[in-house]
């Protein structure tokens, strides 16, 4: 009897939610005929008019009107969850320790840290001289600076060598276009220096008056030029020291950890080039470390008596470590230190006066390998969990024996450790405090392997609350990304407890296109092998269903940006697999975006997706591009999110996609588009505002599962 009562209650709730959905009228986007003709292929695109940039063209008002109508429709459909969303927001916010402080980082005589206060969205950037008992100096009060701004992001904090000046970047729009400011820490005043349209990456020379920075193209947002600024001068008179002519390369500037060199880095997916000067001679001419070579990536780390070079040269797919003398940097002078290995990816190096730490990845997990430079002895740090994430923390001091690293897993909150490389003692400096009585023993994490259709074993990390039964009845949210070689390691999220505590299983599919299993894992999921990313994810979903972790009526998927492309592809390829999809800032109009070099970041992406001006690349990306492959058929319930000021995936991609899906889909499932009219790719800048978007996401999932509190 109780079983039937429960089913009746669930049915009644779903019927009520569905009635609200059926009562609302979805917006119908205008259609304007536009033909794309390329490579003897003619394609009609009725929603191309949405490419009109906000505020710049004749259709911009119509675009905003359409996005507003979609927002209003979402509010109407989800009206019954308004209180639930408010409760979810409060629930997740209440797990966050509002008054908190980061672990101090020592650099050049000062301890630097940030601290937050009760009720405040942002933080204060502070330091203490010589000792943690010294008086506090508030360098920047971001809470105060952000007042009156819908969005405020500060980045790139750099202190001059004499500890007097602070240079930092500010973005008020969420387009990742930063204005660099300089503050005199003796007087507490901002100087007149204001350098606009930068990457937000100031780099001080050792003379305490020269700043190098990356200037961006105001339209494409490409990092195009490295400039030199002298304090007190007009930014219009800044000196160009390097201009990148290859539009597929990203560039940047920074100082070495030992403070001896300033490097300019130019890097694409498959090539790199370093330039350098003596940091004490800012007016000197940058010299090339080694000229760029086709399909060769390299990264430079200076030590006292040599340079270390991490590179894939000579077909070292998983990278090898080499070295060269300080005065002989040509590739012909490089000598091998650590050879390439088929089962180990070398990811990065952290250097010290007497040690180097090598960040390696084996079997999908990070390993930290410590080498003593005095005697070349080595050892590894042990982490002891089946699935976790570990990485270098802030280690700015070159003359130190302490390695700071971060550690987390699906059940272990983010933790900061100091490791003494001489004594091998490990000290926990801080672990994220989860308010409300979180007990990691109440949750279980697993590492599974799904078999892809080509026989490849694809790792899956998952977590659930104790008491879970493998009977196919539990809801499961499967997350994926699978692009740019970005590894989606298993990490903790206190907000995720709101899912787990309501019976959800949370899983991460470590699909090809990422780099979890080595460089080949990435290369097998990009360019003309991109479809492997999508089929891997579908195979992971099928595996979880076959193993009864869930069933298709309870299987959900989520991904953002390039992971949003993944969401778009899987609903075209296997729409029947998923009950619901959350696509966040999704890259879904691949062909049109990659054809338009005026769109921010397009040319930087050719090595990832291909250049559609090449016929083979065009036809391949057209075969999977979500927008191109919408058909008249049933699709899952969907929540799509975007930001009007998004610089990474422009708002018009998800807007066009949703409009076409509305036209073509044959089902009566939910299709909702939420556009944040004030933010961009990363969402809100405050530390609590993003929870509102997350509450909407969870309310969407819970509505589909009949969970109402």
Image (cartoon, rainbow, N blue to C red):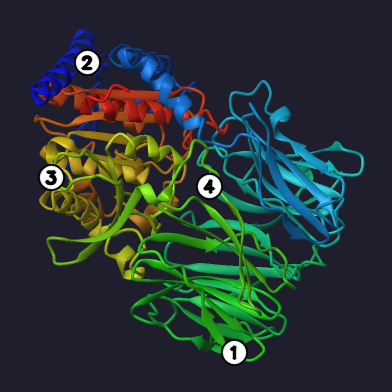
Dot 2 surroundings within 10 Å: few (below 14), some, or many (20 or more)?
Answer: some
Q: In this view, does 334 lie above or below 51?
A: below
| Helix, strand or loop at mark 2 | helix
Instruction: In the displayed orientation, state which residue is furthest to the bottom.
Output: 375
Tell which tag, 4 or 1, sits nearer the viewer.
Answer: 1
Residue toward you, 469 or 647: 469
Question: Badge 2 is on which residue?
Answer: 17
Question: Badge 1 is on which residue?
Answer: 376
Tell which tag, 1 or 3, sits nearer the viewer.
Answer: 3
Instruction: In the displayed orientation, state which residue is furthest to the top.
Output: 23
Q: Residue at x 29, y 43 (%)?
A: 565
Residue 691 in the image, given as x and y percentages of width and height? 47, 30
| Helix, strand or loop at mark 1 | loop
Alpha carbon distance from label 1 to label 3 = 53 Å
Tell which tag, 4 or 2, sits nearer the viewer.
Answer: 2
Q: Which residue is drawn at 22% across and 38% down?
A: 475
Is residue 244 something that shows in the picture?
Answer: no
């Amino acid at each position: 009897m109780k079983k039937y009562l429960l089913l009746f209650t669930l049915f009644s709730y779903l019927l009520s939610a569905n009635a609200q959905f059926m009562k609302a009228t979805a917006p119908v986007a205008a259609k304007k005929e536009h033909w794309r003709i390329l490579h003897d292929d003619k394609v009609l695109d009725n929603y191309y008019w949405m490419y009109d940039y906000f505020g710049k063209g004749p259709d911009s008002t119509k675009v905003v009107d359409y996005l507003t109508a979609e927002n209003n429709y979402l509010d109407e459909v989800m009206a019954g969850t308004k209180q639930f969303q408010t409760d979810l927001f409060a629930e997740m916010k209440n797990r966050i320790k509002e008054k908190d402080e980061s672990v101090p980082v020592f650099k050049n005589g000062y301890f630097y840290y940030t601290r937050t206060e009760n009720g405040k969205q942002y933080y204060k950037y502070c330091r203490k001289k010589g000792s943690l008992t010294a008086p506090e100096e508030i360098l920047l009060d971001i809470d105060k600076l952000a007042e009156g701004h819908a969005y405020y992001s500060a980045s790139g904090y750099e202190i001059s060598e004499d500890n007097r000046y602070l240079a930092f970047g500010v973005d008020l729009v969420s387009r990742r276009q930063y204005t660099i400011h300089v503050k005199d820490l003796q007087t507490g005043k901002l100087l007149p220096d204001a350098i606009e349209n930068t990457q937000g990456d100031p780099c001080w020379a050792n003379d305490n008056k020269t700043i190098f920075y990356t200037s961006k193209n105001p339209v494409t947002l490409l990092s195009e030029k490295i400039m030199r600024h002298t304090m007190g001068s007009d930014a219009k008179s800044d000196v160009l020291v390097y201009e990148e002519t290859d539009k597929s390369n990203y560039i940047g500037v920074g100082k070495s950890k030992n403070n001896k060199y300033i490097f300019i880095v130019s890097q694409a997916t498959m090539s790199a080039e370093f330039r350098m000067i003596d940091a004490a001679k800012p007016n000197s001419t940058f010299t090339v470390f080694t000229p760029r070579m086709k399909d060769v990536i390299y990264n430079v780390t200076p030590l006292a008596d040599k340079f270390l070079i991490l590179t894939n040269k000579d077909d070292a797919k998983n990278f090898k470590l080499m070295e060269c003398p300080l005065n002989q940097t040509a590739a012909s002078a490089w000598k091998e230190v650590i050879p390439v290995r088929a089962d180990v990816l070398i990811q990065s190096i952290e250097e010290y006066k007497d040690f180097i730490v090598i960040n390696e990845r084996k079997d999908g997990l990070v390993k930290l390998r410590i080498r003593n430079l005095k005697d070349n002895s080595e050892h590894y740090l042990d982490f002891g969990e089946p699935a976790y994430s570990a990485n270098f923390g802030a280690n700015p001091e070159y003359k130190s024996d302490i390695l700071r690293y971060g550690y987390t897993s699906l059940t272990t909150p983010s933790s900061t450790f100091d490791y003494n490389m001489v004594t091998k003692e490990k000290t926990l400096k801080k672990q994220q405090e989860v308010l409300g009585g979180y007990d990691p023993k109440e949750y279980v994490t697993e590492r599974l392997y799904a078999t892809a259709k080509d026989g490849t074993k694809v790792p899956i990390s998952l977590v659930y609350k104790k008491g879970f039964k493998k009977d196919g009845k539990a809801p499961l949210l499967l997350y994926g990304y699978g692009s740019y070689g970005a590894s989606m390691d298993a990490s903790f999220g206190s907000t995720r407890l709101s899912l787990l505590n309501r019976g959800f299983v949370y899983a991460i599919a470590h699909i090809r296109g990422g780099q979890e299993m080595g460089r080949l894992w990435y290369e097998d999921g990009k360019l003309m092998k991109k479809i492997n990313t999508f089929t891997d994810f579908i195979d992971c979903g099928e595996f979880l269903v076959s193993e009864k972790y869930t069933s298709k009526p309870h299987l959900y998927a989520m991904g953002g940006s390039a992971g949003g492309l993944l969401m778009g592809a899987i609903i075209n390829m296997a729409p029947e697999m998923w009950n619901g999809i959350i696509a966040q800032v999704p890259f879904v109009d691949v062909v049109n975006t990659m054809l338009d070099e005026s769109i921010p970041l397009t040319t930087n992406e050719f090595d990832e997706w291909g250049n559609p001006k090449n016929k083979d690349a065009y036809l391949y990306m057209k075969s999977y591009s979500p927008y191109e492959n919408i058909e008249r058929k049933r699709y899952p319930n969907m929540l799509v999110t975007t930001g009007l000021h998004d610089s990474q995936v422009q708002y018009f991609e998800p807007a066009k996609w949703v409009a076409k899906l509305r036209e073509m889909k044959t089902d009566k499932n939910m299709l909702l588009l939420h556009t944040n009219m004030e933010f961009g790719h990363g969402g809100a800048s405050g530390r609590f505002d993003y929870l509102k978007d997350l509450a909407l996401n969870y309310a969407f999932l819970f509505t589909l599962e009949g969970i109402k509190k």
